[in-house]
Image (tube, rainbow, N blue to C red):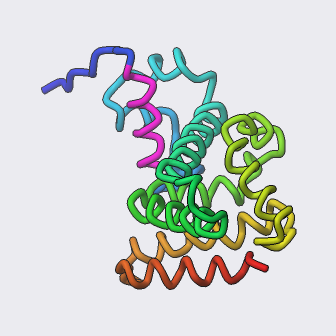
Amino acid sequence: MQKHLSPITKDTKALVLRAALNLIAEQGFHGTSMSKVAKEANISAATIYHYFAGKDELIVELYKSIKIGLMRAILADLNETIPLREQMRCMIRNVIRYLIARPHEAAFIEQFDRSPYNTTMIHEELGSYLQRLTTLIERASHEQIIKNLPDALMETFTLDVASSIARKHTTGALELTDETVEQVVDVCWDAIRR
């Protein structure tokens, strides 16, 4: 019996990105081919090439999509009327909760960050999406609420820790409760606060 392919719709690009995310999280970049993504998305390989020139472009586009979603989640419920210190803690908490709820995205970010795909140019392209977060961090640094750390170190003590914790939770190596999430927030906060 022949399997029918899904019709092309305006959601097809999102379907391709979701299929690629699932495969990459499970099989890594090298184990994921465009034909596997097409099969996972239940579309023809030719359809993927309508949206992406190749696997490299698909991976970079997926990263941008995930990072934009992560930035939105970090800032989603941020109350600008509370003290800046509490806003910073809220952002850390949001990163942890977001990545715990999305283990495939956490795994993808980890792989991407350690790969040759991770270039300064990609981060510059995401600059406008990061502006509110960057402004908040710069303000906290200027007001001497947090240490004056390079962006890479700030990310290491927050995003990288959250990603690692999410992975440990997913594999069953660590059970995260509301209490342990707050402990992780405390540890991350202690690493960056003055």
In this view, the residue in front, 99 or 142, is 142
In this view, the residue in front, 54 or 18, is 18
Looking at the figure, which quarter contains the C terminus?
Answer: bottom right
Q: Residue at x 53, y 53 (%)?
A: 78
From where the camera sits, is residue 154 visible? yes
Looking at the figure, which quarter contains the N terminus?
Answer: top left
From where the camera sits, is residue 26 visible? no
Q: Position of residue 101 (x, y in %)?
A: 38, 60
Q: Position of residue 178 (x, y in %)?
A: 37, 78
Does the stretch in magenta take in 111?
no
In this view, the residue in front, 84 or 58, is 84
Position of 177 with respect to 117 (left or right) is left
Check the image and name the residue furthest to the left. 1
Q: Position of residue 103 (x, y in %)?
A: 43, 61
Q: Position of residue 28 (x, y in %)?
A: 54, 55
- Res. 18 image quadrant: top left
Query: Is 128 above or below relative to 104?
Result: above
Q: Residue at x 60, y 45 (%)?
A: 67
Position of 155 with respect to 186 (left or right) is right
The prevailing secondary structure element of the residues shown in magenta is helix
Query: Is 172 above or below relative to 31?
Result: below
Check the image and name the residue furthest to the front. 81
Q: Residue at x 58, y 82 (%)?
A: 186
- Res. 88 image quadrant: bottom right
Question: Which segment did they paint magenta?
Answer: 11-23
Position of 101 with respect to 27 (left or right) is left
Q: Residue at x 52, y 43 (%)?
A: 69
Does the stretch in magenta take in 15?
yes
